[in-house]
Amino acid sequence: MTGAPTPPVAPPVPAYRRRGRWEHVATRSYGTTVHRVVPDSGPALYVKATTSADETDPRFHPVAEAAALRWLRERGFPVARVVEVGRDDEWSWLVTEELPGVPASGPWRADQVDAVLDAVAGVAAALHRLPVARCPFDRRLAVTLPACRRAVELGTVDLDDLDERHEGWTGAQLLAELAATPVPPEDLVVCHGDLGLDNVLLDPDTLAPTGLLDAGRLGVADRWTDLSILLRDLAEAGWCDPAGFTARYGLSDVDSAKDSFYRLMDEFI
């Protein structure tokens, strides 16, 4: 007879442990935990914590994500207000206020899908219009290609969460495909870096954007860093063809080579 499942471990975060009810939201494949804290008064909070404080790990580093959130917030983007960044001997964490809205991934009624697509395309376009020269975060290929190789060396590639065409592959196989793929010239913009539908929040009534989540990969990169992730999510949802979405975003066609290249790059993170 087996016992009850062990509940997810919450980080210490003593100042918030005393502030209300903790609800486990998720434990990422790489160990980061997410908890929602409902205090006796004031807005709900999210505590995102990791036992890894490696500043070179792109998957989650509290200090880096806090800096990205503050930078976007200063420029008028709807991101969470940073409440605290902290660490002790075991954990490091980021505490933010909860944002309103529901994920753009839905579900939505058929008559809402066009407005959702317009809202998501508008968020991406607005982000990509930010001045590259004023962005302090670098996600160019000179940074990210070595990071892909390092991820394979460290064994941090999530091989259980690969695209269908890469299912069952090893990190070495992914790296070999990346090495064999021509590197396209970069069209640099300010990218979110993980712009999936789950990371865009919309008002459920007006469908206006209300939030951007998980901004830890923010930085100057090719626009297809974001577009490839969005097209992947849209294909899975079956909402529209790639050209239909890129037209809403403001491109006349789909760059298939870049789409494939940056989807491959995303496998390493």
Image (cartoon, grey):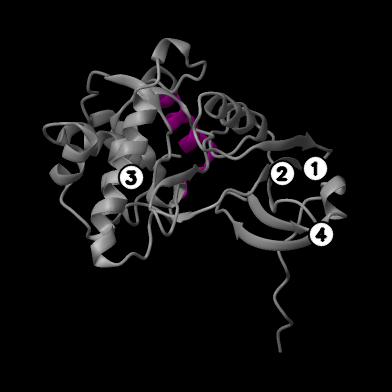
User: Which residue is situated farthest in the top direction here?
Assistant: 133
Instruction: Please tell me which residue lies in front, 15 or 7.
Output: 15
Q: Determine if the magenta segment contains residue 148.
A: yes
Q: In this view, does 213 lie to the left or right of 253?
A: right
- Residue labelled with disc 4: 40
On whether residue 105 falls in the magenta region, the answer is no
- Looking at the image, tell me whether mark 2 or mark 1 is earlier in sequence order: 2
Kindly report the distance in space between the C-alpha atoms of the residues bearing marks 1 and 4: 28 Å
Question: Circle 3 sits in a helix, a strand or a loop, which is it?
Answer: helix
Quote the CA–CA distance across marks 2 and 1. Answer: 6 Å
Residue highlighted by disc 3: 119
- The residue range painted magenta reads 144-158
Q: Earlier in the sequence, mark 4 or mark 3?
A: 4
Q: Magenta span: helix, strand or loop, mainly?
A: helix
Residue type at mark 4 is Asp
Q: Which of marks 1 and 4 is in front?
A: 4
